[in-house]
Each structure stands twice: as C-alpha cells, then as structure tokens.
Image (cartoon, coloured by chain):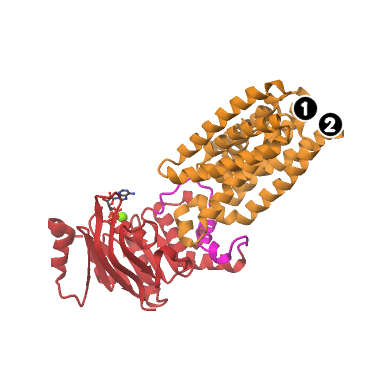
Amino acid sequence: MNNILEIKNLSFAYDNNNLILDNINFTINSGEYVGIVGPNGAGKSTLIKIILGLLKPTKGEVKLLGQNIESFNNWSKIGYVAQKAASFNSSFPATVEEVVSANLYPKIGLFKRIKKKHMEKVYEVLKVVQMEKYGKRLIGNLSGGQQQRVFIARALVSSPEIIFLDEPTVGIDIHSQENFYNLLEELNSKMNITIVMITHDIGMITKKANSVAYVGGKKLIVHNANSDIPLSHVLREIYGDEMHLLHHL
Amino acid sequence: MFEILQFGFMQRAIIAGIIIGILCPLIGIFIVLRRMSLIGDGLSHVALSGVATGMILNVSPLATTLIFSITAALAIEKLRKTYNKYAELSISIIMSCGIGLAVILVSLAKSINFDLFGYLFGNITTVLPSDLWIILGLGIFVVISIFLLYKELFYLAFDEEAARLSGVPIKAINLFFIILIAITITLSMRIVGILLVSSLMILPVAASLQIANSFKQATFLSILFAEISVILGIIISYYFELASGGTIVLISVLILILVLLIKAKKEVKI
Ligand SMILES: Nc1ncnc2c1ncn2[C@@H]1O[C@H](COP(=O)(O)OP(=O)(O)OP(=O)(O)O)[C@@H](O)[C@H]1O
Ligand SMILES: [Mg+2]
C-alpha cells in the first residue's frame, strides 16, 4: 500500500465557532519520515489525535492504512507516543515490563495470558531504547527521560507500520536525543516503519525527515527538498515574525 | 477457637467472608487506580432500596438488590455519556435516587421485621444457606471474569487512551466492569454492610499501594490484607457481638496504619 495516511478537506474546531484547522489536505506515503512543526497551540497534537480517531473531525475525512478512521480496526499497526505521555499517576504500581507489555494485549487476545515469547519481544524493544535493565522497576520511580523511553518502547512493541510521536525528545538529554534520532532513522530505513513526529527542533527535523509539515494559522504546508517554495517563505507564513528567533535554535 | 465453626451460620459467614475478601480488593484495585471510588458508594446506596424492596415483596433481598444495583450501574454508564465532562455527576444523580427511594421504602417496610441495622453495617448471623449458594456462584463468576480480563483492566486503569489505541475494546469492558462492581456490592452486603462495602474495596488497596513493587504484587497484597481483615473481623465480631462490617473495616484501617508505620520506619533507616 502506498498511501498510509490520507487527509482530505479536514477542518476541526473544539467548539463550534473556533476553527483550529481549516480545510487541510495531507498525504503520507508508506516508508516516509515526516516531521510536523509549528508554534505552540497551532494544532499539531490536535491533528494527530484526529488522525488516530481520538477526536472527530468537524469536516472532511481521514484514511489510515486505507481504512476510514471511524471504522478503523488495525490498531496493532499503529504506534503512538502522546505529548507528556509520562504525566501519568506516578504512584501507579506498575513495572516497566507491565507497562510495555500492555500494548501487546490485543495481539495476545482477550482472556489469554502473557507468554514467554511476548516477554522476549518486550525486552527486545526495551533494549532498543536502552532500558532493558529497568524491566522490573516501578515506572513511577524512573526519571522523566527514562519514562519517555519506556513509552517509546511501548509504542514499538506491537511492531507497528507507522509511529506517531508527539514531542518525544522533550526532557531527554542531548546525548540520548542523538541516539534517539539514530534509532528513528534505523526504524525508518531498516524496518521500513513510517514515522510521523511532532517536534519544535526545526533544525534537526529538516535534516532528518524526508519532508516537514508546517502547521500554523489553521493551515498545513508540506515542505521538502523538491518544493518550489523556499523554506524561509514557509517559515514566515507559519511563524510570522518569530521566524528569525527560531533560526538560532 | 475452632468451636465457633460448629455453628452453621458461622461456617457460612466464614465461607462468604473468604469470597468477599477476594472480590472486594480485586474490584477495588481497579476502582482506586481509576479514581472511581465514588462509584462504590453510589451503587451501595442504591442497594439499600433493593433490600427494602425485597423485604416488602417478601422475596430474597439478595435477588432484588442484584437487580437494583445492576440497573443503577447501567444507568450510571448511560448518564456518564450525557454528562461526559462531569463523570461524577452521573454517580451523584443515581446515588440521590437510591437514597430517596431507600428512605421511602424503608419507612414503608418498618412494620415488617426488618433488620435495617444489619444490612447497613453487616451481620454475620444472617447469611442464609440459600444466600451462600448465590454468593459462591456469583463470587466465582466475578473472580474468573476479573482473572480473564485482568490485563485489559490493568491497561484501562493505567492509560485509557493508549488502551483504546492499542485496540482494547474499552466500551464493552467498562460496561462489564461496572456490572461486576454492582454484583460485588450485593454479595458483600450481608457481611460488611451496605455502608462499609466500599471501604473494604479501598482500604486494603490503599495499604498495598504503599509497599507493592508491581501491579501483580499490589493485587496480591490487597487480597491478603482484605482476607486478614474479613476473617479476623468475623471472629472478633462473633465473640464481642459487634457489627461485623465495622469490625472488618477497623481492622483494615489498623493494617493500613501498620503498613504506613513500617514504611516510615524503613525510610528513616535508609
Ligand atoms: N481539549 C481541548 N478543548 C478545547 N481547546 C483545546 C483542547 N486541546 C487543545 N485546545 C486548543 O487547541 C489549540 C491547539 O492545541 P494543540 O494541543 O493541538 O497545539 P500544539 O500545536 O500541539 O501545541 P504545542 O506545541 O504547545 O504542543 C490550542 O489553542 C489549544 O488551546
Ligand atoms: Mg502539542
């Protein structure tokens, strides 16, 4: 399949008169590595939630893996790391193992127990995010960055075809961020996982991603190496006068 | 001390007690972690009107209460969709209906010989042989259900949004879970009493959360604490002729305090 995500004429408002997104079109092909950037409150997280069916579009349609999102049922093919995924109830008595294996439950099936091969898969992805030594630790007792890695592992454990990451590198130190970007590149190139990542790190994402979607002023503009419009133009359109500020980052 | 087991009612009380000592914390751990504690109180108040109805109609209060509390559970789920921004409002509405109805029915039933106090605070002498079979049967049903849905219930409690996105059928599980709560409250009311059921769901879990190192351990410790409370509570309430529910709940409070003290002492050492 080529079009892994297809958004047509999408508009969205939390309350009726206040459009956050206005008539957006957006397509992502299988195997792409796409960044989503834009100012705070532009609607990036909202867009991802609409794509995942967590919010209903006011207008327009969303197709994920060729299926209409309202009737979508292929959830094991989708990975998602929410913005502030790590802001859960920190006294929840769950180990890293228990949290990561949770995303395998639908695969394991209702009424069935976790088996050894599932645990092996859990440790395989924990190793990918370098957290394999923390399997038995309570998730609430880890640092914010470590928790974030656990949630990335959770998104990877069901072997998804596409992963949505909402500011996954917030709270992760520079060295680990580098590892993380390398990890994404590997997942993308070796395992052919489509990656959609929201970030404020424009410098990094323009280098790493195949294309970058700029969200702002209720619009979405895709920019990549083949685009006719110069990037500076897009940035001014989306960020306005803040643009030169962000250039320093 | 085993002489107390020669009485049929004590045997029944102990068996029923062992079952609800598993049920209440097993349901309770998910209630606590999902911050739904109010639901236990809401449903148990409705249970009282079920009891009164059974008395007036002269049928098994256990059966009428079961019908009342399951209906109330379904109503709460339905209302929760109407007031999705104020989830606890739906519980308050149903709870008000339950209390209002209960007060009227209880005043109607006054003429009948009605052990209101026993239903409110628990009375070990009142578990009838026919009750025991219902408690046993439905109790096993609830335990097996939780056992089979354990991992999905865990995921729902930890992160409902992620559970939904991973493909867990959350609507169906939520609905089924609230019915399990209603059944558990009904089964527990003879031993712990309507007003104290939700305490037995919450206190052992509160104690276990202080020291558990995993979700499995938290579940196991909650059940252990609840069993100690229930069995000791039944025995003590027999010898001192106390309301069993009150005794059981006070023992759970003691266990909680003990756990907190031990934990505090450990932390000082480190
Ligand atoms: N649940 C909600 N109800 C009403 N408005 C909301 C809700 N969530 C977000 N908004 C509003 O929608 C707009 C877009 O929010 P969104 O979270 O999508 O922004 P974002 O682009 O992800 O920003 P950030 O970079 O800060 O994460 C904001 O103006 C926000 O205030
Ligand atoms: Mg956001």
Q: Earlier in the sequence, mark 1 or mark 2?
A: 2
Q: Is residue B211 visible?
A: no
Q: Chain of mark 1?
A: B
Front in this rendered view, residue B178 or B146: B178
Q: Is residue A83 above or below residue A186?
A: above
As helix, strand or loop, the secondary structure at mark 2 comes to helix
Percent x, y for residue B173?
55, 53
What stretch of residues is rendered in magenta? Answer: A85-114
**Amino acid carrying mark 1 in the image:** Tyr
**Residue under the point 22% across and 58% down:** A218
Percent x, y for residue B140?
71, 49
Q: Which mark is residue B254?
A: none
Q: Is residue B254 magenta?
A: no
Q: Is residue B158 left or right of residue B232?
A: left
Q: Main secondary structure of the magenta part?
A: loop
Ligand 1 lies under 8 Å from the Cβ of mark 2: no
Front in this rendered view, residue B260 or B42: B42
Q: Which colour represents chain A?
A: red
Callout 2: 10 Å neighbours few (<14), some, many (20+)? few
As helix, strand or loop, the secondary structure at mark 1 comes to helix
Q: How many marks?
A: 2
Give yes or no for contact between labels 1 and 2 (Cβ–Cβ under 8 Å): yes
**Amino acid carrying mark 2 in the image:** Ile
> Which residue bears the numbered disc 1?
B238
Which chain is the one coloured orange?
A: B
Q: Quadrant of the N terminus of chain A?
A: bottom left
Front in this rendered view, residue A64 or B219: A64
> Which residue bears the numbered disc 2?
B4
Q: Chain of mark 2?
A: B
Q: Is residue B36 above or below residue A196?
A: above
